Image (tube, rainbow, N blue to C red):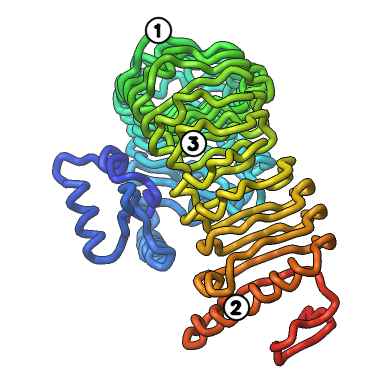
Amino acid sequence: MKLNLLRQLQVKYIDFLLKDRDYSVVAGLERSKDKALISISQENTVSMHDIIRETAWQIAGQESIEDPRSQVRLFDPDDIYRVLTYNKGNEAIRSIVVNLLRIKQLHLKPQVFTKMSKLHFLNIYTAGTRDIRFYEPWGLYLHQGLESLPNELRYLGWAHYPLESLPSNFSAENLVELHLPYSRLKKLWQEVPDLVNLRVLMLYSSSNIKELPDFSKAPNLEVIDLRSCVGLTSVHPSIFSLKKLEILDLEDCRSLTSIRSNVHMDSLRYLSLYKCMELKDFSVTSKNMIMLNLELTRLTSVHPSIFSLKKLKILDLEDCRSLTSIRSNVHMDSLRYLSLYKCMELKDFSVTSKNMIMLNLELTSIKQLPSSIGSQSKLEKINLVFSSIESLPASMKDLKELTSIKQLPSSIGSQSKLEKINLVFSSIESLPASMKDLKGLRHLDLRYYRNLSSLPELPPSIETLDARECVSLESVTFPTIAEQWNENKKKVVFWNCLNLDERSLKAIETNARINMVKFAHRHLSTSGDAQAIYVYPGSRVPEGLTHKTTHDDDD
């Protein structure tokens, strides 16, 4: 029955929460899984079907009716109201789970938990149709404060905790997880207790917290979530000495100006400083760092130590509008995704990684890619929308997706792996004839390409061609009729291309017929919603179509 309270937790945390000398938690979970009572995901997260959960509640509820004094688990709103309002708690109670949106107004006395010395799980949360961000704790009041919390607590969750600190006599020695989101806390503890068992700390959206306690007494902390703690002005240095810390989320801590540590951390894998809009100074490293998010900060440069992180896969510097240069002499090993989107002042760029897959330089002021980027043999996608880059290095051979560039090289046909080209809003005046040699090209997006006057022959591999609003387009070239029978086009759009000459319009119509016939033949024996689309200017329905109309059909 305890599992009913622990849905969506990882197995390792459930093991800590239910730890018992006479009981193997992991073995118990496996037995429950074998009986289809729970499921365990690839991420080792435990889930329980709603029907099974409801059944468990009904069984526990029946037990409480038969003998209220032996109630171990409290989750019925009426039972909880009775116990908390009239101080009916006792040592039998092990867990309380209450949704504040489903319970009557509670005015608690300071001694409300005094008799519940064996309470292990306390979860006061909000869940329902109302948005938690705008919820005010009208349902629960502690007008005279809180005298104590049970020292046996292993899981403490209290959304909108209404006091400025936790009780000073709460030892917290047994705590494994502490969840106090949207709290009114100013200081977590007056004096930091021994937190040897604490693994998870969630204080997100506690806007009154200005500083964090010393975490040297919490050596096993693995997750710290401080998102939207907008009043937080500093991070205690002890955090960077935690040997087991894996996740540190400081998203939207908008009062932080500096995060710096001389300690090279061991276990930190994920660090987010997204929307820390006043952050100007940053230097934190970890030998196991996988993801670093510095989006929407005020950094003017990136500390060189970042480029020495051997396991870093994702580096997000989007919208760092004060960033002018990002340069490294170190050829990184593991970096796969680098985004500099909207770094509008960025002019100097030289970062390479042998495993880079995606590079986003949209809306930057970079004018030239370093020649060394051609050595990035795994680079598949590069986004240059509204950037100042005019050409690609000749050494770049393995791209799969190219988004916008000021000038396509005449040798573009040598990009044998290129599958998608996006030239939306491009100002290029012409496309190179070598495009017909792009044997793997499947998607070409030319929307709003207003300077394009002619479209060269394209390879037979093309499946979608979108040239809507190419208002200057006059001519389109197709291969021979015999070669067109090798095509498999599914979508071709020349909407509002009103300057196409008569030869091109006839060629488009012929190409449409060929591909429609092939499409119909291919899908004749299949069921489903398969469709092919051809859109081009004209005032008549093409001959050969048996179902014709000049009216729109919206039904």
Quadrant of the snapshot with the N terminus: bottom left
In the image, 81: left or right of 53? Answer: right
- SS at mark 3? loop
Position of residue 325 measured from the top left corner of the image (x, y, whole percent)? 58, 16
Quadrant in the picture for residue 494: bottom right
Residue with the mark numbered 2 = 514
The circle drawn on residue 112 is 3
Q: How many marks?
A: 3
Q: Residue at x 82, y 79 (%)?
A: 552
The alpha-carbon separation of the residues under discs 1 and 2 comes to 67 Å
* Figure check: 505 above or below 396: below
Mark 2 surroundings within 10 Å by alpha-carbon count, few (fewer than 14), some (14 through 19), many (20 or more): some
Quadrant in the picture for residue 171: top left
The alpha-carbon separation of the residues under discs 3 and 2 comes to 79 Å
Q: Which label sits in the foreground, 1 or 2?
A: 2
Position of residue 22 measured from the top left corner of the image (x, y, whole percent)? 14, 44
Who comes first in sequence, dot 3 or dot 1?
3
- SS at mark 2? helix
The circle drawn on residue 262 is 1
